[in-house]
Amino acid sequence: MKVIKFGGTSVGSAENIKRVKEIVLQQNENAIVVVSALGGVTDKILNAARMASIGTGYFHSELTEVKNRHYRIIEELFDDKGNDVFDRVDKLLKEMEKILTGVTLVGELTPKTIDRIVGLGERMSSHIIARYIPNAVWKNSADYIRTDSNFGKANVNFKVTNRLIKSEFEDFKGIAVTPGFIAGNDSGEYTTLGRGGSDYTAAIYASAIKASSLDIWTDVDGFMTADPRVISKAYTIKSLSYAEAMELSHFGAKVIYPPTILPVYQKGIPIQIKNTLNPEGKGTLISQKDGNGKERPIKGISSISGIALITVQGLGMVGVTGISMRLFTALAKEDINVILISQASSENSISIAIEEQSIEKAEFAIRSEFEKEINIDQINKIEIETKLSIVAIVGDNMKNTTGIAGKLFSTLGKSGINVIAIAQGASELNISWVVKNSDLRKSLNVVHESFFLSENVELNVFLGCRNRWRASFKPASTTTGKTFK
Ligand code: ADP
Ligand code: ASP
Ligand code: MG
């Protein structure tokens, strides 16, 4: 049995849902089909909820749009007007309206209420698709995926979840369609797995039933060398190891939600990323590293914005054990996720990158923890920089290749980009660096050009050259960042 997941764009119109049906029917294998809400619907529901919470009636316009999207799609998909599915979806829309009205009246929107309404997007889309695919049955993910009550980004109880999924699906034959993103807690309340969480839902099912494959169908041709919305020349990567995919997604490649990789990696289940709008495309295979050593050292580049950097500095930190432990414990107690750490070997300063929104909390936590050291000047500076981004290049083969860091930083330097902090793990799978938001686009462009387009550049030049040039000619543009047309 395999697990197939379709994202928001893939199920965002009647035309695309028709493609989804074709793709599912071509599989010739029992399948659990996990679907997202119709593209854009999750944002609309969240918007409506926010409007309701400030007590305005404006949520009605958002709600009407959500309603009309669903009614129209049902009308376009079903000749018989899909009466039964219309009733089901209409009931869920009425539930949404009732909750939103309640939120307006009380003027309060709790994370629990948000999860209850935001998950309606997936519940509606999955009913429509289950009805549209012949002989498919609808199953509610909230019945099988059990989480704690950390609404908004709940933690999965894998022991219970695996048991529930196995007992339902182990002997299942046919096609089951089920909502992504939603789950349930022990009290029978709806929870969600975090934005983009439908990928994770699919991975949870795949891991529990030890699926033959996890196929993620989205709106691009696969995992690409960079975000195609930013880098127009980004191209599809044929294959990635689990570790590479995990690093790239962790550093911002939205094509796959980061927690997705671990459950399937643990079972050795391959992930295929494919384009619903171009099913013939080869896509990307994520699996164990094939280890043929012929791959490019760098597979992709990704980035995260909205970053702040805290630098703790002081001569009193040099050679003192336990400083880092106290620093990270203080941040962990406040639930602050550390994205990047950089420490000079002199140990007199340590820089930590975190999400900008946590900066005040982080500064307070650090100042409280090191109050004594600050008072006696052992720590003399806590510096904060905001409006930053982290960029990362990722590749398993980096460790077998010399000169990557040299090439990277000379490319950035020649382009006049100021690198604020740098980090490289000992595994050499990733080099990440911090730049100002205003330098982000340029950083991505010059590094992508330098590491990913150089082969294309050479090929283009060689096509126009005589053979005898081949051995010696190296185009200057590889280092200047220009491309040959
Ligand atoms: P879905 O709704 O199918 O889950 P998402 O919008 O979550 O799709 O993810 C797909 C999008 O991720 C693409 O449209 C693309 O803009 C973005 N993206 C960012 N980085 C990458 C990358 N390295 N490769 C492919 N897509 C990327
Ligand atoms: N619909 C949810 C979101 O937009 C989950 C998903 O699509 O993966 O975040
Ligand atoms: Mg997604």
Image (cartoon, rainbow, N blue to C red):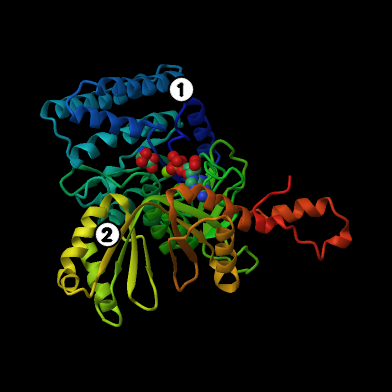
Image coordinates for residue 349, horizontal then vertical, percent: 33, 71
Mark 1 secondary-structure assignment: helix
Q: In the picture, residue 414 is in which quadrant? A: bottom right
Q: Which residue is mark 2?
A: 159
Asked if residue 6 shows in the view, the reply is: no
Asked if the residue at label 2 sits under 8 Å from ligand 2, the reply is no
Image coordinates for residue 229, horizontal then vertical, percent: 52, 41
Q: Which residue is mark 1?
A: 77
Decide which of 465, 297 is in the foreground and name it: 465
Image coordinates for residue 312, horizontal then vertical, percent: 29, 67
Decide which of 38, 427 is in the foreground and name it: 427
Density class for disc 1 (Cα within 10 Å; few <14, some 14-19, many ≥20) is: some
Asked if residue 147 shows in the view, the reply is: yes
Q: Amino acid at mark 2?
A: Lys
- Residue 182 numbered mark, or none: none
Image coordinates for residue 332, horizontal then vertical, percent: 23, 63
Q: Amino acid at mark 1?
A: Leu
Mark 2 secondary-structure assignment: helix
